[in-house]
Amino acid sequence: MSDTLSLSHPAIADLSHCIGHRVTIHGFVDAIRDQKRMRFIVLRDKTGKVQLAQSKEGSALTEVEFG
């Protein structure tokens, strides 16, 4: 994710338009699934859900999957 998008807080339903950009999203945690090496966090707002993947070796969120 290289550039910052002009949308500062897009709705989760609009994230498909933000691929390749760094954005800040707001919502609440719907679910957390802990695996051996990864943690999956499902974030929800009024427009939908997004799954975040976090390596347990680092603290930064590394991937986003739309769903």
Image: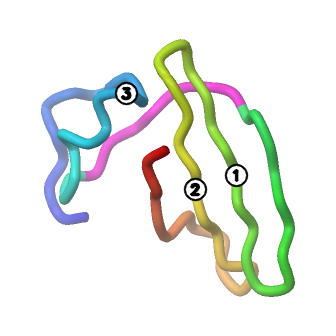
Cα–Cα span, label 2 and label 1 = 5 Å
Circle 3 is placed at which residue position?
13
The residue labelled by disc 2 is: 52
Q: Is residue 28 found left or right of 48 in the rendered image?
A: right
Q: Residue at x 32, y 42 (%)?
A: 23
Q: Which region is colored magenta?
A: 22-28
Name the residue furthest top: 46
Q: Is residue 39 above or below residue 35?
A: above
Q: Are marks 2 and 1 in contact (CB under 8 Å)?
A: yes
Q: CA distance from mark 3 to mark 1?
A: 17 Å
At x 58%, y 56%, the residue is 52
- The total of numbered circles placed on residues is 3
Q: Which residue is mark 1?
A: 41
Q: Which one is nearer the viewer's eye here, 38 or 56?
A: 38
* Among the two numbered marks 3 and 1 on one chain, the one whose residue lies closer to the N terminus: 3
Distance CA(mark 3)–CA(mark 2):
15 Å
- Residue at (14, 56) in percent of width and height: 3
